[in-house]
Image (cartoon, grey):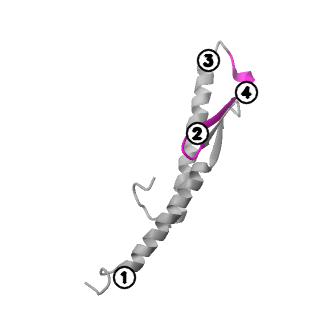
Amino acid sequence: MARGGFPGMGGNMGNMMKQMQKMQKKMEEMQKQLQESEVEASAGGGAVTCKVNGKKEVLEIIIDESVVDPEDVEMLQDLVMAAVNEALRKVDEMMESEMRKLTGGMNIPGLF
């Protein structure tokens, strides 16, 4: 084993630890920023809109009056569910995209 590091690592352990600490700090900042972010998605051509934050909390659901039909409650339920699921999917995409930027595309399981 080479002095001050592991074979093939190209640097000493101290530098690697400093880099990991910097990355951890950036990740914490990014997570805070993402949690404060909001995404919006709609279904039914804008008939139902859902706003979700980075904590995956539903902040707002807007339903166009034209889709409120007492005879077809199931359609409204489906539109609400579709809008919420799309908003949650967008939050996941946003988080994955930011994580790829931070890690340079490294696959580090369990970060989120």
Reply yes or no: does residue 63 show up in magenta: yes
Residue at 70% x, 22% y is 67
Reply yes or no: does residue 89 show up in magenta: no
Residue at 55% x, 43% y is 89
C-alpha gap between disc 2 and disc 4? 18 Å
C-alpha gap between disc 1 and disc 2? 45 Å
Say which amino acid is labelled 1.
Answer: Asn
C-alpha gap between disc 3 and disc 2? 20 Å
Q: Dot 2 surroundings within 10 Å: few (below 14), some, or many (20 or more)?
A: many
Residue 29 position by quadrant: bottom right
Quarter of the rendering occupied by the N terminus:
bottom left
State the extent of the magenta-drawn residues as a range.
Answer: 53-69
> Helix, strand or loop at disc 1?
loop
Q: Earlier in the sequence, mark 3 or mark 2?
A: 3
- As drawn, the label of residue 73 is 3
C-alpha gap between disc 4 and disc 3? 14 Å
Q: Which residue is mark 1?
A: 12
- As drawn, the label of residue 64 is 4
Residue at 49% x, 70% y is 22
Q: Which residue is mark 2?
A: 86
Say which amino acid is labelled 3.
Answer: Val
- Give residue 103's position: percent from left, percent from top: 49, 65
Residue at 62% x, 49% y is 37
> Helix, strand or loop at disc 3?
helix
Say which amino acid is labelled 2.
Answer: Glu
Q: Earlier in the sequence, mark 1 or mark 2?
A: 1
